[in-house]
Amino acid sequence: MINGVLIYSSRGDLIVCDLLKSSLKRTISDIFKIQVINSLEMKSPILTLGSTTFHHIRSSSESKLWIVAITRSNANSGVIWEFLYKLDSMLTAYDLNNEEKLMEKFMVYYEMIDVMLTSNAMPINTELSSIASKISYRLPKTISNSPTNEKNNNNGLSIPKFLTRNSRSMSQEFSNITQSDIPWRPTGIKYKKNEVFLYVNEKINILVSKDQTILKAYVDGSIDLVSHLSGTPICQFGLNDYLSMTGNNISNRGDEFRHDFMDDEDLSTGRSSSSSVKIEDCTFHQCVSLDKFNDERLINFVPPDGSFELMRYHVRDDLNIPFKVTPRVSISSSRCSMRYKIILKSLFPTSLSAADAMLKIPLPPGTVDCKINASSGKCNFSTSDNCAIWKFNKYKGLTENELILETVPSSSTDILSLQQWTRPPMSMNFEIIMFSNSGLVVKYLKVMERVQKYRPVKWIKYVSKSGSYEIRY
Amino acid sequence: MSDQRIFTRYRASEIGVDLQNSESKKLKNNVLGRKTALRKIIANLTLGNVNEMSYLLPEILKYWQIEDDYEVKRICHEYIRKLGPSKPKNVQEALPYILNDLKSKNQKLQILSLKTLVVVPSPEFFNEAFEFVSQTLNRLSTVKDELTKEAIYCISVLDEADHDRVLPLIDTLMDIIENESKEPSFIVAALNVVCIISERNTNMSNMTVRVDIAIDILEMLPTLNEWEKAFVMECFTGKVVPQTHMESTNIIQLVIPQLQHGNTSVALNTLRFIFYLLNYVEFTTEELSIKLSSSIIALLNKPPELEFLILRNIILLLLSRENSILNLDVSYFFVEYNDPIYIKDTKLECLYLLANEVTLPLILEELEQYATDIHIQMSRKAIRAIGNLAVKLNKESADKCVECLLDLLEFGVDYVIQETISVFRNILRKYPDRYRNNIDILVNCIDYIQESEAKNAMIWILTNYSDSMHNCLEIFKVFSSNIKDETLEVQFSILNSSIKFLMRYGTKESESICMEVLKCCTEEIDNPDLRSRAYMYWRLLTLLQTKDNHMTNETVLDIIDGDLPVIELNTKLDPLILQELELNIGSIASIYLKPVSQIFRLNRPKLLISSPVLNPDHDSLKIIKSNSTYDEFGNESKNLDNQRMDRRSHEMVSTNSTMNAIMEDYDKPAETINQLKGNMKSSSTRQSRLSRKPSQLLRRLTKKNHSNELIIHFLSGNGCLMFFHI
């Protein structure tokens, strides 16, 4: 299906030219370079010329590699883009996600792609721990275990410890590939200390209209897991999901774990334990038994080793909105200036605080300076993006701050240009630890290993970040 | 040696020297040097230095024999794979080495060799690969083993080379598919290969999968990995033909959980499979439509390229069914400031398609926002959408759209005005009298108009509403006197309008304008079409003056100034094309929304195969509430349908009101209020930092230290993770 994979540096130097089908000519790589990389107008992520189609993505790392798939028929774009993203995260896991490294170790790519694709170039395996057990290169050790440190936190991958091998000679390795019954988990994993790390990462998206009504508000969340567990553990996982809480099976669902994670963080997440969240749409990692979820709303799974994204969810109702921004903007016709009066109020509990809270206030064109008075925090005028940035290193809960800002226009600015200015929305950035915008609470995580019967250590962290937090005025 | 760059063009002799050097002593860094030299060969093949590198085959073969290192082995194979396709003759010598690897005990190496074998397009390589694959198929193990799986997938590559020889193997593959005792991943592999082969070879009969076999395979889904699940869903679409309503609903029930798979392709392929199966049911349930809608929304939360794909497919689904199964909230399609332009564009189209009388106010507010967007293209599209909505929806909605457009006119930016005027023409065509009062406002904008489409629209408006204006001829003169500099379209409009004016009024003024225009068109402008039309009008006018024919003023007026047909917006695609596109959800064709045959001529077109339960018409599909039974439905389907619509619109309203209510709900009183102190300061005064008093500096430092401490404290708590005893 995929007839070729090309990887270019951000400038357009070809690093990998992997033509999987003999009918393709090498010159095809020049075509993509001319038509897409060097073209300024080309904006779409897909290009079809004749019957040849290029799907491309830019890699998540800073070096912004171009990762391209070539197809010749009416291929399934969903499969192709999904595969390209998986390939990208695989390159990241092997620390090949920048030009220099990839130029040096491009053979790792060839080895990787051999496992990831079948001989007729269909993606078949993209699970890191499974691939790592099949190729001879070691995973680099430097990658952090925490999925939150990843740039692209939907692909939080990291190194399973057992995979560190020293010898590369093939006479010692791979003589027998042991296949377990579970495609994503090799057998014989062993840890001295059994640990599970749970991350609840949420992004809140909100759009507030001029008259302060909320046009849309939703939370996109993901639950990422880093599992360092021996053997073949079976995990069960519970949330304060509305449907599973109100279902009939609530009583027989084992009160024994009820107190696993509860008690303490109910206070911090600002929600009482009795309340529940209506999770509208969720998707799961392939390890989760979907039938079981569908029938009983239980999340049961055998985790892959290392880190992975267990589920994604989407919540729209009853959100804990963390900040309220009340802008009042007026035009002073005598001075041709704009006057902003902004009240920023945090709505989360006082026990918490937001890190790196930042409000970006777009200013009209022709602004040369502004007069600022802020009750707290720092506010600076940034000439490069023509906006004012109001910053707080730390913003405490239930706190109100005020900012008054008046623009100083250049001499050529006229009142009409102020009136006609399109006023792009103000936007906010922040990160709150141990707060959940959706009110989602992990109620329990039960780990069972039939043979070894250990009790793993469990960790949990809630991180709420701003997605697109926009306020019109 | 190793400090030399790998990605540079080298001559074969240079790399040869490198390799020889590395052999002189058996030292550790020589092994490294050899690998670097070998890597240079592959890099050079990537760079296109193929001829030069083909001289190095003897060197490669030498290392093939003596090396036990896996990386060197891999480089050797990669060399053959890269060189083979363009120079199959040259790599002939390597065949024994590859076969040797294929016979080894190491399965990893065997797979590697098999993949290399099938890449090289030469009969010798083909024979060996074919031999190996047939043998493997004959002694098919029931144990899960990678080599067998790979061998099955190879068949589809071999088929491309020589279809006739592979044909007998297909029966064996069908056996595998129909024998459920076999290893699941073999079954999927076989299924996949047979599907691909039958799709590629249009002379083969269309492959179908029996329903009972399909159900057996679907029951194995939990044991398959994500990509295998995606293949199964893809293969079954169009290949499994349910014969009864029960069969279809059973299959749907089996695959529904897969909608929640994290892998986009699994979820999307499942969606496609379900939409395909919905052609074979007598009715569907509301529960299913909720599940489908929510899975689509979940799919939107993906990287931009995938989001784009989903949005394009939403357009397809909205177009294909009049009475949509989906129930999507419009707010998901509101454009975000940071969206890439291709997503903004597509969201706009979705908004347009989702608009109905209930959702219009919300959508209109958004569109008005986009119309003043910085991005000109976006702004124009938004205005066009507003105009089209006015034509598409009912009268009351048109009022709202017109109001919105008039607001935009006041905004005073030229492209906004021009676009608005252009769309207004269509609205006026649909409602000729409803907005007569607003004509003046439109005509007042005449100074902003520069583009030909807007000019056209303005001329049309002037001409059609000339009776409600006292000075229309004067305004028209602005255009007619400039006729030579206009684009062809505008010239046509001017010509038509000048004739209309003459026929309507017959005044001196209109006559002089008309004569001038006719003269200019026939004598000064080169375009033959314009010239002949001008002549045609001219003859018409002369005919009118000659007495002895039946041409009257009325007939001529009828010809040149007749009633225009009522305008209608046709967003519908051909139902057959839509049917085909629905079978191709998620594919490249679904992005372009074009029939597959238009883009890829060689593909076998997908068609719905007939069955006793095949629905002839998309729109006749009924959705019933999950608890209603079949009998109830038979009698009251219409009723239920209406109820459903009511309920939906009711929901829409209620979500709106809850949305508005949130704002009051979520606000809480602040405990700390920081008041403003001091005066406003200029942000660019930097000297203050320099002239800061030493005591202030000290305070700053201590503050900084304090915050550092805090961080350290935080980290020592194990990366700010909370710990719970169990």
Image (cartoon, rainbow, N blue to C red):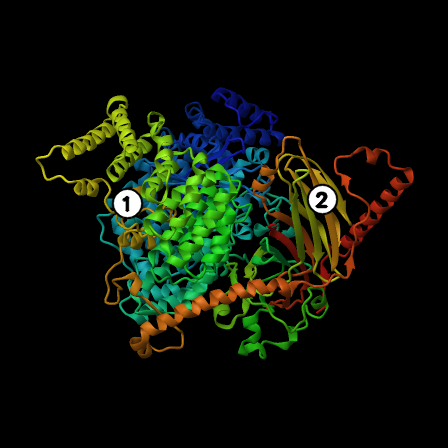
Residue A330, position in %: x, y? 65, 46
Residue B142 falls in which quadrant of the image? bottom left
Identify the amino acid type marked 2: Leu
Residue B507, position in %: x, y? 27, 35
Residue A86, position in %: x, y? 51, 48
* Residue A213 vertical placement versus A9 (above, below): below
User: Measuring 56% from the left and 40% from the top, which residue is drawn there?
Assistant: A420
Residue count near mark 2 (Cα–Cα under 10 Å), binned few <14, some 14–19, many ≥20? many
User: Measuring 40% from the left and 70% from the top, which residue is drawn there?
Assistant: B644
Q: Secondary structure at mark 2?
A: strand
Q: Is residue B68 visible?
A: no
Q: Residue farthest to the right? A: B695
Name the residue carrying label 2.
Answer: A405
- Discs 1, 2 touching: Cβ within 8 Å: no
Judged left or right of residue A284, residue B170 is: left
Decide which of B589, B109 is in the foreground and name it. B589
User: Measuring 43% from the left and 52% from the top, which residue is drawn there?
Assistant: B401
Residue B144, position in %: x, y? 43, 57
Judged left or right of residue B558, residue A260 is: right
Name the residue carrying label 1.
Answer: B597
Residue B163 falls in which quadrant of the image? top left
Q: Chain of mark 2?
A: A
Q: What is the C-alpha distance between the residues marked 1 and 2?
A: 60 Å
Label tally: 2
Residue count near mark 1 (Cα–Cα under 10 Å), binned few <14, some 14–19, many ≥20? some
